[in-house]
Amino acid sequence: KAGVTQTPRYLIKTRGQQVTLSCSPISGHRSVSWYQQTPGQGLQFLFEYFSETQRNKGNFPGRFSGRQFSNSRSEMNVSTLELGDSALYLCASRPDRGPTGELFFGEGSRLTVL
Amino acid sequence: DAKTTQPTSMDCAEGRAANLPCNHSTISGNEYVYWYRQIHSQGPQYIIHGLKNNETNEMASLIITEDRKSSTLILPHATLRDTAVYYCIVRVARDNYGQNFVFGPGTRLSVLP
């Protein structure tokens, strides 16, 4: 079974630009979460989607947005990039069945903002 | 979700058992204990979870105290590839409101040859 796939793995942008990151969850998983990881703040929750609906949102500015498609694939977008947005962006999916719903993470997309 | 406290770092000799503690003194009765690890520059990897009873799988064992205020993750025979940051998380079981997993700073485990 293929794992969570994130693209691109690495990208470099300049301040003021926007970026779109993509995540394909494990087949059959309908829940997709996004996290930002930086050396200073650690892993921080961005948002979670389930069946194309955002269910939960972390404490990030409106420049960070996301969406989920009918095939459960998800994208996140960051507009008007700032230097502080340089981070590893991680996507995770979890199964619908079972009570505890552990997360399965992708390898991440490493964004560098110059 | 309850907060957890873990040591910042630990060392372990290769081939020996690595015991990683976690305090979660305010855990609620319906909250599970999860363990994840993150090897450098990779996404976190699920290890194990439990509610009350001790759990074991192919990767590790999880020992939860009777009062559930603390737990220990045991890697029975640590290898160099177990060097990683280990996160202990407590949260309720699946809910319909998308409660997120809250990751603390974790414990940086270094397995030494």
Image (cartoon, grey):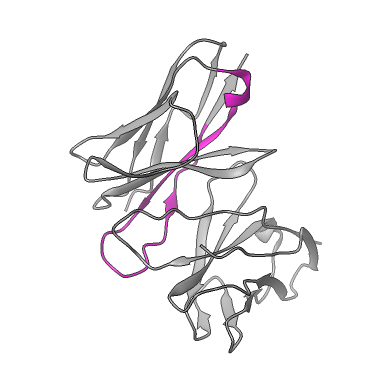
Q: Say which of A73 and A99 sits in front.
A: A99
State left or right for residue A12 relative to residue B105: left
The residue shown at (44%, 53%) is: B100
Q: Is residue A97 magenta?
A: yes
The residue shown at (39%, 45%) is: A33
**A61 in relation to A17, above or below:** below
**B43 in relation to A99, above or below:** above
Instruction: Specify the farthest residue to the bottom.
Output: B66
| Residue B112 coordinates in the image, percent (x, y) | 81, 61
Q: Say which of B112 and B107 sits in front.
A: B107
State left or right for residue B2 relative to residue B18: left
| Residue B5 coordinates in the image, percent (x, y) | 69, 65
| Residue B111 appears in the figure | no
**B41 in relation to B84, above or below:** above
Q: Quadrant of residue B85?
A: bottom right
Q: Is residue A70 magenta?
A: no
Quarter of the image with the C terminus of chain B is: bottom right
Q: Say which of A74 and B100 sits in front.
A: B100
The residue shown at (32%, 49%) is: A26
**Magenta stretch in the rendered image:** A82-109
Q: How many marks?
A: 0
| Residue A67 coordinates in the image, percent (x, y) | 30, 33
| Residue B48 coordinates in the image, percent (x, y) | 50, 70
| Residue A44 appears in the figure | yes
Q: Quadrant of residue B68?
A: bottom right
